[in-house]
Amino acid sequence: MKAWPYPLWVAHRGAGKLAPENTLAAFRAGAAHGYRAFECDVKLSADGVLFLLHDATLERTTSGQGTAGEQAWSRLSLLDAGSWHSRAFAGEPLPSLQTVAAYCRRNGFALNIEIKPTPGVEAQTGRAVGLDATRLWAGDALPPLLSSFSPDALQGARDTAPQLPRALLLDALHEGWFEQARALGCVAVVTAFGLMDADLVAQLHGVGMRALVYTVNEPAEAQRLVALGVDGIITDAVDRFSPGAAVFA
């Protein structure tokens, strides 16, 4: 297989436990712990701006209400996305993908963009991510990895940015998943960590695809997966796992 250019250890939603998830504060917290690769969730505003947010609705992690994708960026950009986590992060805004791209590129960080579309606009969101990622990372030697649970979103990204690497996210090994990943031209599959075993790693590597896992927070699991030879480990435990360590206590 070609050399995999992305770091093994990936900080989930930035460092989404130490700081408000999917904010620049979370990215900075992960970077302070030595992480050089980050995962984040991206969706599309009503007026076509890509921004970071996991949930379909705003209530859990912002001061807003309602479906995020039905609102304009001019409104979303004013929300407080930090107070829910702790007072220290009060006023932290939702970042746009453009802001995160600038941060990652200027620091030489790798990014895994999970396309997290509002229900009903999967393909549209994927197409927008493909277009913007192509523009924002133009000329960069390390483009973002585009992943999604939604095949329609990945196909949308493929339509507008066939050159960008894609990964299918799986929370179960449903019938036809392997054929689906290959049909979408994926370079990797990212599974819930409990699904990954030696046979699955061998199956993926056997066709030139990479094996990544989410969300690994326990040392025993980390050790097992490293021994299996997985290519990427997404974790919340950035303060427990050093990216350069071989043994985890």
Image (spheres, helix red, strand yellow):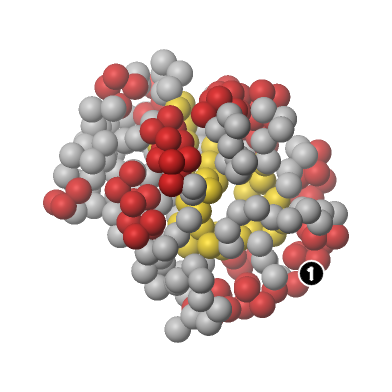
Residue at x 23%, y 27% (from the top left corner): 78
Position in image of residue 45 (x %, y %): 41, 23
Image quadrant assignment for residue 22: top left
Answer left or right for 49 relative to 156.
left
Extreme-right residue of the structure: 206
Where is residue 126 drawn, in percent x and y?
59, 29
Quadrant position of residue 159: top right
Numbered disc 1: secondary structure: helix
Against 155, is 3 above or below? below
Give percent across and percent down for residue 66: 31, 29
Q: Quadrant of the N terminus?
A: bottom right
- Write the residue at 33% across / 52% down: 28
Q: Quadrant of residue 161?
A: top right
In the displayed structure image, the side of residue 188 where residue 28 appears, left or right = left
Image coords of residue 238 (percent x, y)? 40, 65
Left or right of residue 124, residue 11 in this image: left
Question: Which residue is denoted by mark 1 in the rendering?
Answer: 199
Residue at (49, 49) in percent of width and height: 109
Quarter holding the C terminus is bottom left
**Residue 95 vertical placement versus 38 (above, below):** above
Decide if residue 3 is in sight here.
yes
Residue 31 placement, left or right of 130: left
Residue drawn at 30 percent across, 59 percent down: 18
Q: Amino acid at mark 1?
A: Asp
Q: Residues within 10 Å of mark 1 (few under 14, many from 20)?
A: few
Closest to the observer: 249 or 180? Answer: 249
Outermost residue, left side: 87
